């Protein structure tokens, strides 16, 4: 479908978008802003090939990780803020154990996207579920989103399971829609609507 040229007006970013109050606290985790010094901790886990098994691209270099963290820090000062790339830390130890992403896109249309990654040595402890649940809660309550989506490779069973556990519905499969590392990648898309989230919250609080 080709959109009418009026759709260019959809790209305007409203100036009154709500923003997140950080850090976010969950039962075991603190989700906080990155600082420039965090790059080496991030590099330590993203250089693990296991982390990239179901993600496009190749293991990033030190320079790329430094640039990513510098970008995340710059985004902290942008208003209205639409990109939150955050550090996941274990509250007890203070250690960085992963990353959390929430993005308002496109701004002004109630749409958001989340992402998450956990240090491979700490997989299967429920951390990603805890992170994703926190992102979804603040996405609907603080950022006032209407729909929150997440996507991953169809083979990424752990990521799909996290999305299912949060009540997100599978909306579809984008077949071979981008190219990275010399091959085409497909993505499954899951999403949750604000009214579905309300229903889940009501049912679980009974
Ligand atoms: C995807 C990822 C974040 C999951 O992290 P995690 O902390 O291990 O996830 P959780 O412990 O919360 O587990 C969630 C569910 O997935 C299941 N699961 C975990 N690994 C699995 C695997 N390899 N295969 C199938 N199910 C798996 C868990 O058993 C759990 O389900 P259950 O409660 O019904 O038992 C982690 O594998 C990761 O960081 N991968 C690399 C980055 C990535 O792919 N991110 C997602 C793309 S946005």
Image (cartoon, rainbow, N blue to C red):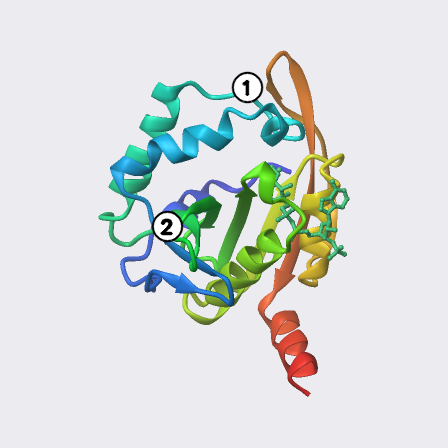
- Determine if residue 123 is in view: yes
Instruction: Find residue 58 and name its label.
Output: 1
Quarter of the rendering occupied by the C terminus: bottom right
To which residue does mark 2 refer? 82
Percent across and percent down for residue 50 are 63, 28
Report the residue that reaches farthest toward the top. 182
Residue 163: x, y in percent?
67, 54
Does mark 1 have its CB less than 8 Å from ligand 1?
A: no
In the displayed structure, would residue 46 be above or below residue 119? Answer: above
In space, the residues marked 1 and 2 are separated at their CA atoms by 26 Å
Rendered residue at 47%/47% (across/down): 101
Q: Nearer the viewer, residue 183 or 165?
A: 165
In the rendered image, the quadrant that contains the N terminus is top right
Q: In the displayed structure, would residue 99 be above or below residue 51?
A: below
In the rendered structure, the answer to whether residue 43 lies left or right of residue 66 reads right
Whether residue 105 is visible: no
Q: Secondary structure at mark 2?
A: loop
Give the SS element for disc 1.
Answer: loop
Classify 10 Å Cα crowding around label 1: few (below 14), some (14-19), many (20 and above). few
Looking at the image, residue 198 lies above or below residue 28: below
Side of 150 where 21 appears, left or right: left
**Viewer-closest of 149 and 65:** 65
């Amino acid at each position: 479908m080709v959109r009418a040229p009026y759709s260019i007006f959809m790209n305007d970013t409203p100036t009154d978008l709500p923003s997140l109050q950080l850090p976010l606290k969950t039962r075991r985790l603190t989700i906080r802003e990155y600082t420039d010094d965090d790059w080496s901790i991030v590099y330590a886990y993203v250089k693990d090939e296991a982390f990239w098994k179901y993600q496009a691209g190749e293991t990033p270099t030190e320079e790329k990780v430094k640039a990513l963290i510098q970008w995340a820090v710059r985004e902290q000062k942008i208003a209205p803020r639409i990109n939150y790339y955050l550090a996941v830390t274990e509250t007890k130890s203070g250690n960085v154990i992963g990353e959390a992403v929430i993005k308002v896109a496109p701004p002004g249309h109630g749409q958001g996207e989340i992402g998450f990654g956990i240090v491979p040595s700490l997989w299967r402890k429920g951390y990603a579920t805890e992170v994703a649940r926190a992102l979804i809660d603040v996405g609907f309550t603080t950022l006032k989103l209407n729909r929150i989506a997440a996507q991953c490779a169809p083979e990424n069973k752990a990521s799909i399971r996290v999305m299912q556990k949060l009540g997100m519905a599978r909306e579809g499969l984008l077949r071979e829609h981008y190219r990275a590392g010399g091959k085409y990648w497909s993505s499954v898309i899951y999403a949750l609507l604000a009214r579905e989230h309300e229903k889940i919250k009501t049912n679980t609080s009974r």
